Image (cartoon, grey):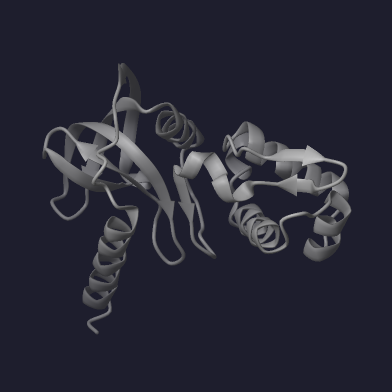
Amino acid sequence: MGQTTALSPRRLERLLQMDRLLRNHGRISQPMLAEQLEVTQRTIRDDLHFLQDRLMAPLEYNKKDGWIDLQQLADERIVFRWGAELNLDPEIWQKLLETCRTSKRIWIHYYAATRNQYSERVVEPYLVHVYRATNPYIIGFCHKRQSIRWFRIDRIQQIKILNKTFKRDPNFKADTYLEKIFQAEVERLSQHYNL
């Protein structure tokens, strides 16, 4: 039960607020974070450990500077945008984070809602994208389509980590694909609400 609630919308929003505070202030202490976010220092401590242990955030602490370096969250393999909400299988989420960090291929059993069918894919996961008003996506190279594709994480039915590493395409530009996802979501919502 703890694993499932660990990524509740309320907690994720707090983590995003922490991210914003650390980016803007750089050097900030646990008491300062607790005061700004109106929570206990224990909650802040738990959140910082969560960022380090579960999201592999390269946080460092020293008495002079406080907590720093959240900007490099998960080695730039996770992109958060403000207000995101998650309702995911924690095992699938953890495996995606791990493979983005270690550059290992994955096999997924995926449900494509637009075609109402299931398929099996081998994917080289580049990054996880979480954005307000959309669902979280994994972006990476799809061997079946031989191109960069994005997959909604909540539609991944099964996942296996393969014992094969990969190198990211040096021409891959995250912003280009994030914009495509945003456009696709806008079109989907427009069709749904007949805008």
Occupied quadrant, residue 144: top left
Residue 180: percent from left, percent from top: 25, 62
Count of numbered labels shown in the rendering = 0
Can residue 1 be seen from the camera position used here? no
Occupied quadrant, residue 61: top right
Residue situated in front as seen by the camera: 45 or 112: 45
Residue situated in front as seen by the camera: 168 or 93: 168
- Please tell me which residue is depicted at 22% across the width and 38% down the height of the picture: 141
Q: Left or right: where does residue 174 sit relative to residue 101?
A: left
Residue 128: percent from left, percent from top: 41, 45
Residue situated in front as seen by the camera: 136 or 117: 136
Residue 101: percent from left, percent from top: 45, 32
- Please tell me which residue is depicted at 82% across the width and 39% down the height of the picture: 62
Residue 102: percent from left, percent from top: 43, 26
Q: Left or right: where does residue 172 sit relative to residue 23?
A: left
Q: Left or right: where does residue 130 sit relative to residue 21?
A: left
